[in-house]
């Protein structure tokens, strides 16, 4: 599909206490907001919630009282997130896997975006051991095996239907392919040099637990690279995003990484080239977040029981209703890239869209 990266991607390095205008406040970005911004999070303390003051544009970060629990664990009624549930994700991909590579990736996750998002993972050695969590049909794995020998790469996913597509891809024939849960990885502690997960966190009922697992399975000095969507700034997209699944704010990604124990946490913004690097319209954009494991062993973060018990029986009518509403909300995100692509064709080049 698209072969160029948008011009305005930005790397956010965390080193002071200012935040880019627009982050998390629903006001959207201007093109100039896109470059050289720094996002702030105290490195020494862990915070539960981050509030952005519109007036001062500074982050207010009240300290977490007790806490070990995930900041995204509760789903307020305004954010039902119908497909942020393992059973729903299973059925969603039971059907979506049939068209995933042909319909989803061209609109939301292009080869140029993928390669740009993987760049901070620093896949610098062909002998690195890499795990691709929520690897699905292997689209991101195809980017990984450009740099690392396929025999050193494991693709893990909860969907056998997605994995069946990965198995058919010739460059991935030497990869190990495993069914499993991102929140409970079947790898030993201190196992991998790189942890990659692209476009999967939005389905995890407890993202903090998944990121804690990323920390655990990495070797000391190993790097996690987690790629995902960002909470849209445009109100209608935000509404559909919250109905459909988890679209974290940039601050949340960073906070989850820091709470898990990662150091040198960085966030790079990504998007298809037809967005022209502008976030002012606030539709949907993504990010690639990286962090380095500073010490061997498990994450220092302690968590309580799992957010979701997949064994618990569900009412089939409630399940079907949630599933149908989730799919309806998801349809909006098929229209968004088409709209943006058309705008890119119409608005003269060089002007923001
Ligand atoms: C949008 S696809 C991304 C696939 C692939 N990483 C890519 O770049 O195209 C999301 C994938 O996450 C998987 N997934 C969702 N929840 C998961 C979980 N708890 N554990 C493992 N995989 C999960 C889905 O089955 C699906 O294949």
Image: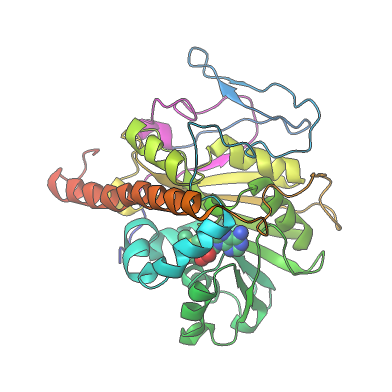
| Residue 78 visible (yes or no) | yes
Quarter in which the N terminus is drawn: bottom left
Query: Closest to the observer: 301 or 29?
Result: 301
Specify whether 300 is left or right of 224.
right
Q: Is residue 45 above or below residue 95?
A: above
Query: Closest to the observer: 277 or 179?
Result: 179
Query: Closest to the observer: 122 or 226?
Result: 226
Query: Closest to the observer: 127 or 226?
Result: 226
- Residue 13, percent from left and from top: 59, 40
Residue at 46%, 83% in the rendered image: 169
Residue at 35%, 48% in the rendered image: 7
- Residue 274, percent from left and from top: 28, 51
Specify whether 267 is left or right of 340.
right
Q: Is residue 37 above or below residue 183?
A: above
- Residue 323, percent from left and from top: 44, 53
| Residue 197 visible (yes or no) | no
Quarter in which the C terminus is drawn: top left
Looking at the picture, the colour scheme in use is rainbow
Residue at 70%, 21% in the rendered image: 62
Residue at 66%, 45% in the rendered image: 265
Query: In the rendered image, which quarter is residue 16 located in?
Result: top right
Specify whether 68 is left or right of 27.
right
**Magenta span has 26?**
yes
Q: Which residues are magenta?
A: 7-34
Number of marks in the image?
0
Specify whether 281 is left or right of 65.
left
Q: Is residue 97 above or below residue 182?
A: below
Q: Main secondary structure of the magenta part?
A: loop
**Magenta span has 177?**
no
- Residue 30, percent from left and from top: 35, 30
Query: In the rendered image, which quarter is residue 257 located in?
Result: top right
């Amino acid at each position: 599909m698209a072969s160029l990266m948008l011009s305005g991607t930005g790397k956010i390095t965390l080193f002071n206490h200012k935040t880019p205008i627009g982050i998390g406040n629903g006001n959207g970005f201007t093109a100039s907001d896109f470059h050289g911004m720094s996002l702030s999070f105290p490195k020494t303390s862990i915070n539960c919630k981050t509030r952005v003051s519109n007036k001062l544009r500074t982050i207010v970060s009240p300290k977490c009282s007790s806490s070990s629990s995930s900041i995204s664990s509760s789903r307020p009624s305004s954010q039902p997130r119908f497909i942020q549930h393992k059973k729903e994700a299973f059925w969603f991909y039971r059907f979506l896997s049939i068209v995933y590579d042909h319909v989803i990736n061209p609109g939301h996750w292009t080869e140029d975006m993928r390669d740009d998002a993987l760049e901070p993972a620093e896949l610098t050695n062909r002998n690195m051991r890499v795990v691709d969590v929520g690897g699905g049909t292997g689209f991101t794995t195809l980017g990984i095996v450009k740099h690392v020998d396929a025999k050193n790469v494991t693709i893990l996913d909860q969907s056998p239907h997605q994995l069946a597509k990965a198995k058919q891809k010739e460059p991935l024939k030497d990869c190990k392919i495993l069914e499993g849960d991102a929140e409970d990885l079947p790898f030993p502690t201190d196992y991998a040099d790189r942890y990659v997960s692209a476009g999967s966190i939005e389905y995890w009922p407890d993202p903090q637990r998944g990121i804690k697992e990323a920390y655990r399975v990495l070797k000391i000095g190993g790097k996690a690279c987690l790629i995902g969507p960002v909470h849209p700034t445009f109100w209608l997209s935000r509404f559909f995003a919250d109905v459909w699944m988890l679209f974290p704010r940039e601050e949340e990604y960073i906070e989850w990484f820091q709470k898990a124990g990662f150091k040198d946490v960085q966030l790079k913004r990504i998007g298809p080239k037809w967005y022209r690097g502008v976030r002012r319209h606030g539709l949907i954009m993504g990010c690639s977040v990286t962090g380095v494991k500073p010490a061997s062993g498990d994450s220092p973060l302690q968590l309580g029981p799992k957010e979701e018990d997949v064994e618990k029986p569900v009412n089939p009518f409630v399940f079907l209703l949630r599933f149908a509403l989730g799919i309806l909300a998801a349809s909006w995100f098929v229209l968004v890239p088409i709209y943006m692509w058309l705008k890119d064709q119409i608005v003269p080049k060089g002007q923001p869209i």
